[in-house]
Image: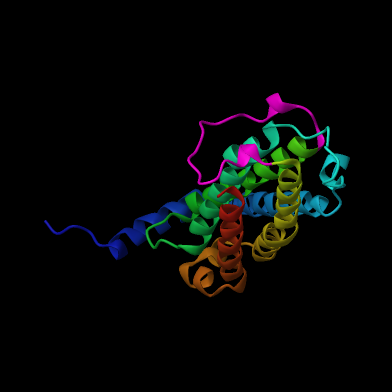
Amino acid sequence: MVAPTMNDTVPSKACFSRYSNSDGRLEQRHKEQLKEATSRLRGRLDMCAGWELPAWVTASPDHRATGVSSDIPYRFAQVVLPGLKENLDTLSFVLYSPDMSRDTILWCEEVLQSLKTILDPVEQTDLLIHEDQKNKIPKRQPRVHHRDITQLDTWSVQRLVSQVKELYETEILQVSIACETFFHDFSYASCSIYNLSTSQEISDIGRLTAIAMEKIDVMIQ
């Protein structure tokens, strides 16, 4: 018996999508959820531009900053930045690597989940920099990296925090803007293989996430 090809699987997937969205309600729900997710991410990142960094970040390197927590570089190196990189990579893969055998409804759910998970590192950063609530940020098992970022001096920690803030204000914010633009008039037809492969916004997301991930690697290596 000859194994089915990728093209053979497309009709069944398409039929499933049409059946599940027979009254159009599921498509409308996804449209609203995607707009809400992109809008929330954009709004959260817009707030980063208004962040007033605490005194210990902006203090002169000649003075020992009493507000520096030894947990800060550890959390950035082991939790926040690796998590952000992983989430960006997932979003880029889902959006930028269309699969002919993929189901449209499942694709929408994957995109939604990716957008929501990018919020986590942003909120963790805000919490880590501005509040002394260490227990709210879960620790993961240590990851291998080339430089012991947990032993940074005060000036280096200050510089690291400023770099993270700048990353949110540039590439990550631009990713959210591109997502918001692409999903503004979303329909299931707009996530066709052709539209995804020719969309300027999707191309921008792929480029920007790659730049952001390179910057993250530099910060934690």
Magenta span: predominant SS is loop
Q: Nearer the viewer, residue 12 or 160?
A: 160
Residue, far top: 135
> How many circles with numbers are drawn on the protein?
0
Residue 220 on image: x %, y %: 58, 48
- In the rendered image, residue 132 lying in the magenta stretch gets the answer yes
Is residue 8 rendered magenta in the image? no
Q: Residue at x 30, y 62 (%)?
A: 6
In which quarter of the view is residue 132 placed?
top right
Comparing 176 with 141, the one in front is 141
Task: Identify the image quadrant of residue 199.
Answer: bottom right
Q: Residue at x 83, y 37 (%)?
A: 65
How are the colours assigned in the image? Answer: rainbow
Above or below — where is 192 with respect to 135?
below
Placement of the N terminus among the 4 image quadrants:
bottom left
What is the span of residues highlighted in magenta in the rendered image? 130-152
**Is residue 23 in view from this perspective?**
no
Q: At x 60% / y 47%, what residue is drawn?
A: 84
Look at the picture and state if 129 lies above or below 205.
Answer: above
Q: Is residue 143 left or right of residue 162?
A: left
Picture residue at 50% right of the left edge, 44% below the top: 145
Can residue 158 be seen here? yes
Q: Name the image quarter holding residue 80.
A: top right
- Give percent across and percent down for residue 60: 86, 47
How far across and how far down the image is residue 148, in percent?
57, 41
User: Toward the viewer: 92 or 81?
Assistant: 81
The percent coordinates of residue 20 (x first, y second) are 49, 49
Residue found farthest to the left: 1
